[in-house]
Amino acid sequence: MDGPKPTGDGTAPSVSLQPTIHVERDIEHLMPPFKNKLLFYCNFTPDNDSNLLYTVEWYKGYNTLGSLLYESEPTKFITEHEFKIKTALTEDKMGTIGIHLVCSVMARREKYGIPSTPSTSESFFAGIEVVNKTAVHISTNLDNPIIYIRSTIPFACAGEECLLDINLFVPSVDDCRLPKAGVQASSGCGVAIPKTKWDQPQPLTIALKEADSSITTDPVIMEVYLKTIPRFLSHKIFQNHVLPDRVQVHLSRLNMAILNGKVCHAICDPHMQTFDQLLYENQREGTFVLYSNTDYPAEVQIETKSCYRNNNPPYCPCGVAVRAGRDVFVVNKCEPPFEVRMVQCLDGVLKGKVTTDKKSFTVNLPTGTVVHIDNQGYFETYGISYNVIIEPALTDYGHKNGIARTKGLCGTFDGNRSNDLLKRDGLFDNPDLVNHWRDPSSFNEDWR
Ligand SMILES: [Ca+2]
């Protein structure tokens, strides 16, 4: 027979409520004293029996129930709004952000009746978290790593555009072991969360603070913390808060080893070698891009001529132009008038960086790359031939934003020989078809 179920019959209700935690910001108070607060609701669908009384308990805890933060009075579920207000966990009872919360609901038939088995929510992290929690790796040759910071709770501050600033810091508890190099946010001090986009992950790029020359062990592992700004008066629970997630950063200089013995060369009569030591030939006349750094404005061009000026092989490099910024150093011994000079010196970055020894030249680029222009003299009747040898630096290695740091006849310097014959259009010649006596099909022409 239908009708109201009896209450107070001494039995516990049998309910399964599957509560979930939701958070809201109370009405914003934008004038002092700011009474902004967060409200956490334990949402569930009530049982068909509208006479049941529910007790909502709030715990601090992750997977297990920790300390009790708040326990509501046994409350009837009459309207959802009223019930939520009466059973909500408020910010003042939470004490701090950056904790996990669990809510638990029990039902009774009367105020002092026997409670049902508690229905417990999944834990909810109430705070600001690092989304990608795995260690990040920094070296001079890798793209700077990005971590994402996300708030799971809204905050109050004046203006639609207002932000909550979170700063990156390295604790100085053990200065002796910390590398001087260190890390920093690539722009500003950290990351800012916009009020209106509080639940959207915000990227934070971590960069080396300075050159890694002071890092002597490999790798150095350090922990970096994130902390909200010291004063956030409009919503104080957000101020001076250290995020529980730490970011482990691995600083590495292991890449010094990758430079060992790696040179690119064009030696008479141009026998070519890329940085990754692919050998090929360039038996043709013209001006070619030998080396270009895609990250810094540095480039080396060579001019080749038939060594005996008879339009037949062999061909010899007889001219070299080295550009860094807007400075250009030129050696031209291909055709008279011969010249060796700084044709342009607008930035002064090559000033004092060209040394001469017995008609040979060494150019030190700001990138650390060294260009040797060695006089071979074999064909002096017709001009002078040079062996051009480039010693790469760490700034030449690898890729940045998906783009190889070097291009040109020296190839892409990344330890992978198979991608060395990269052309301007992004296509490759087949490295398997070239060797120390055979030209690639179109690679050389492409860098003319
Ligand atoms: Ca390569």
Image (tube, helix red, strand yellow):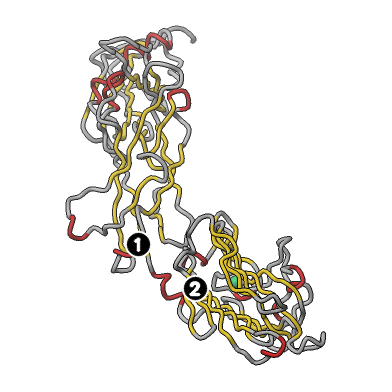
Q: Amino acid at mark 1?
A: Asp
**In this rendering, position of residue 306 left or right of residue 101:** right
Q: Quadrant of residue 242?
A: top left
In the image, residue 109 lies at what x, y percent? Answer: 32, 14
Residue sitting at x 43%, y 46% = 205
285 over 293 or under it: above or below: below
Image quadrant of ligand 1?
bottom right
Quadrant for the C terminus in the image: bottom right
Q: Work out which residue is located at the far front of the displayed protein and give it.
A: 337
Residue 433 shows in this picture = no
1 over 165 or under it: above or below: above
Q: Quadrant of residue 90?
A: top left
Residue 280 shows in this picture = yes
7 over 426 or under it: above or below: above
In the image, residue 334 lies at what x, y percent? Answer: 70, 79
Within 10 Å of disc 1 (Cα), the crowding (few <14, some 14-19, many 20+) is: some
- Please report whichever mark, 1 or 2, sits nearer to the chain's N-terminal start: 1
Residue sitting at x 30%, y 33% = 228
* Helix, strand or loop under label 2: strand
In the image, residue 178 lies at what x, y percent? Answer: 23, 58
In the image, residue 184 lies at what x, y percent? Answer: 35, 48
- In this orientation, which residue lies closer to the viewer: 234 or 4? 234
Q: Kindly identify which numbered label has been placed on residue 370.
A: 2
* Helix, strand or loop under label 1: helix
- In this orientation, which residue lies closer to the viewer: 95 or 148? 148
Q: Which residue is mark 1?
A: 212
Q: Amino acid at mark 2?
A: Val
